[in-house]
Image (tube, rainbow, N blue to C red):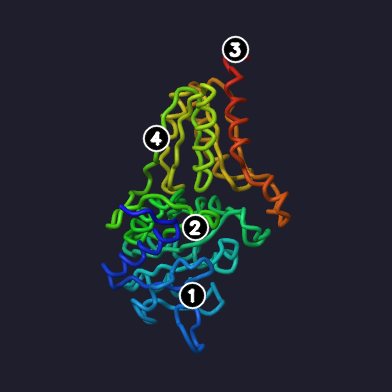
Amino acid sequence: MTKKSYREAINEALYQEMERDERIILMGEDIAGGTGAKGDQDAWGGPMGVTKGLRPKFGPERVLDTHLAEISFVGAAAGAAMTGLRPVVELMFVDFMGVCFDQIFNQAAKFRYMFGGKAVTPLVIRTMYGAGNRAASQHSQCLYSIFTHIPGLKVVLPSNAYEAKGLLVQAIRDDDPVVFFEHKAMYDSEMDVPDELYAIPFGEANVHREGDDVTIVAFGRMVNLANDAADNLAKHGISCTVVDPRTTSPLDTETILETAAETGRLVVVDESHPRCSMAADIAGLVAENGFDSLKAPIKLVTAPHAPVPFSPDLEDIYIPSTAKIEDAVRAVLTHDRRAAAE
């Protein structure tokens, strides 16, 4: 096992899967870099360098730099997936989804359904999301709840390098379209990652720790903040369960409901906007199916219902923080719903 960054883990998953299966191709803007120009044809590897080194190994037939037109190459990838290839497409920022959303939700997501289950669409769309890099409102949004809403899509949110490799391998091997969300603030974060191939099944949440007082459900990068908050709270005698769903579709509702029932208190941490978010979805799930087990109202820790600010000071306030999570945990601990009802 070797210490690898989030970026390196994703690159390794792509490399090893492409070695294993020659049907896998990569498509995206600047994923090789320098195409059509003199000099190194692997100069960039995408804006974050994730695909660097793959074009020299697998060649221009399998690592395709595309033109700046997501509507065409995402549509082309969906068609290629139906005809025997297994494309991995990079949608540079999820904020650009509006350019190609019809190809994703109205085409790829519906092929299996519309063709009576006979069509498979092994398409992976890798995309970046999240605030914290001073990229402003049009390059920093958390839009995974929109994709989660669409039947036929699988949606993945790895929270660290280990999860990133295993979940991407699973995504590439899946026969349905998968949207794979990579938080841009995590690319340099490191941890031990196995050198060999491994796959993490979809729809199975990871319980990072178990506690007696409060359950925290968090998504993507927020899982790390939730663990930091749980560490700090443990110093004050507060014991938290931290749940990482890993995938929002399929969603491991059983683990969420069980852990919420065990502690009787729930905090949901979601970097996206509060309205129609995953935080709201989880709160609704537990309120509908586990209300009797709750000892306090559910608390949500989210970004505000506003665009991501470019100002560094405002952006730092905008993003959910460890301190905000700790405050939410303390708030649910000081409220007894049953006592208040009496």
**Which label number is shown at residue 62?**
none
What amino acid is labelled 4 in the image?
Glu
Compare marks 2 and 3 and give the one earlier in the sequence. 2
Query: Whole-Å distance between the Cαs marked 4 and 2?
Result: 31 Å
Query: Whole-Å distance between the Cαs marked 1 and 2?
Result: 25 Å
Q: Is residue 41 above or below residue 198?
A: below
Tell me the mark number nearer the camera, choosing from 1 and 2. 2
Query: Whole-Å distance between the Cαs marked 4 and 1?
Result: 37 Å
What residue did someone put label 4 on? 254
Query: Whole-Å distance between the Cαs marked 1 and 3?
Result: 58 Å
What amino acid is labelled 2 in the image?
Tyr
In this orientation, which residue lies closer to the viewer: 342 or 36? 36
Cβ–Cβ under 8 Å for marks 4 and 2: no
What residue did someone put label 1 on? 73
Tell me the mark number nearer the camera, choosing from 2 and 3. 2
Percent x, y for residue 305?
69, 46
